[in-house]
Image (cartoon, rainbow, N blue to C red):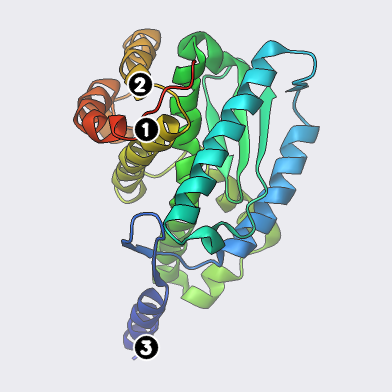
Amino acid sequence: MTRILLSAFLAAAIFISCSQNALTGKSQFTLLPESELQAMATQEYTTFLSSNKVVAPTANRDAEMVKRVGQRIVAAVNSYYQEKGLADKLTGYKWEYNLVNDAAVNAWCMPGGKIVVYTGLLPITQNEAALAVVMGHEVCHALLQHGNQRMSQQMGVQAVGQGLALALSQKPAATQSLFMAAFGAGSQVGVMLPFSRKNELEADDWGLKFAAMAGYNPREAIPLWERMEKAGGGSKPPEFLSTHPSEGNRIAQLEKLMPEALKYYKPVGN
């Protein structure tokens, strides 16, 4: 009887928690209110910046570039959402763009538009348009609510053994850990990873479009990922053990997406 009741409870929770993403129009499984995630993101972002070396845009050309790219992509996002009658879906977004002095080849965007680019990424991007491709991709993770989906999926996995109420009322430390994991590279093989790879390709699609809308050439995505592949030096794990598609598979997908992205491209002199 307990199993039956738990199964019924979970089925009801999943049904109630299915929402429609404003950008794609597709249904998605999100247990947490986006406003709650945005509040957590603001807190975690502040903590992260206070414990890392932030490069000031007033004294560094690379940091200035990160801010400029961020502003142009956000302007494109705002314009697109306004045109589609979706401006209210950006309520709560308070965009920030920061370059952090760290050798990791990485960038991310938390809910509400909290963006970080690591200095270790810049030797790979090499130019502003390629950086825009990466930042557009990360911005779309936030717009597509991929972090919410990852957290909700993990909570659903926990609920199978614990009950949904317990999964949603974790201790603060556990909640914080789960939040950071949803926006990091660590995931479990089997359930989380295939979903994450799907998220990555979806963010590639919309990221290319928004970079193009911002006036950056989306074609820069191809040589960018060729450089990523070369930088990897064959040391990366097999694709099924990674949260990201292999570079070769990613390049093939980007080539398929390119004609659509180019429809949005209007050069502005970069």
Q: Which residue is mark 3?
A: 5
- Label 1 residue SS: helix
Residue under numbered circle 1: 208
Residue at left offset 74%, top offset 50%: 43
Residue type at tag 1: Leu
Q: Is residue 67 above or below residue 178?
A: above
Amino acid bearing label 3? Leu
- Give the percent coordinates (x, y) of residue 68: 62, 26
Query: Toward which corner of the image does residue 201 lie, by quadrant?
Result: top left
Q: Position of residue 169 (x, y in %)?
A: 61, 70
Q: Earlier in the sequence, mark 1 or mark 2?
A: 1
Label 1 CA crowd tier, 10 Å (few <14, some 14–19, many 20+): many
Give the label, 2 or 3, closer to the camera.
2
Q: Tell me: 104 left or right of 266.
A: right
Please give left or right for residue 23 compared with residue 165 in the image.
left
Contact? badges 1 and 2 (CB < 8 Å)? yes
List the single residue furthest toward the bottom.
1
Above or below 63: residue 110: below
Residue 64: tell me if it is visible. Answer: yes
Q: Amino acid at mark 2?
A: Ala
Q: Quadrant of the N terminus?
A: bottom left
Tell me whether circle 2 and circle 3 mark residues in contact (CB < 8 Å): no
Residue 235: x, y in percent? 35, 14
Residue at left 50%, top 47%?
79
Give the side of residue 61 with respect to residue 192, left or right. right
Instruction: State the separation of the CA atoms marked 2 and 3.
Output: 49 Å
Mark 2 closeness class: few <14, some 14–19, many ≥20 residues within 10 Å: many
- For mark 2, give the secondary structure: helix
Q: Give the distance between the C-alpha atoms of the residues marked 1 and 2, in whole angstroms.
A: 8 Å
Q: Which of the numbered marks, if any, corresponds to residue 221?
A: 2
Q: Quadrant of residue 7?
A: bottom left
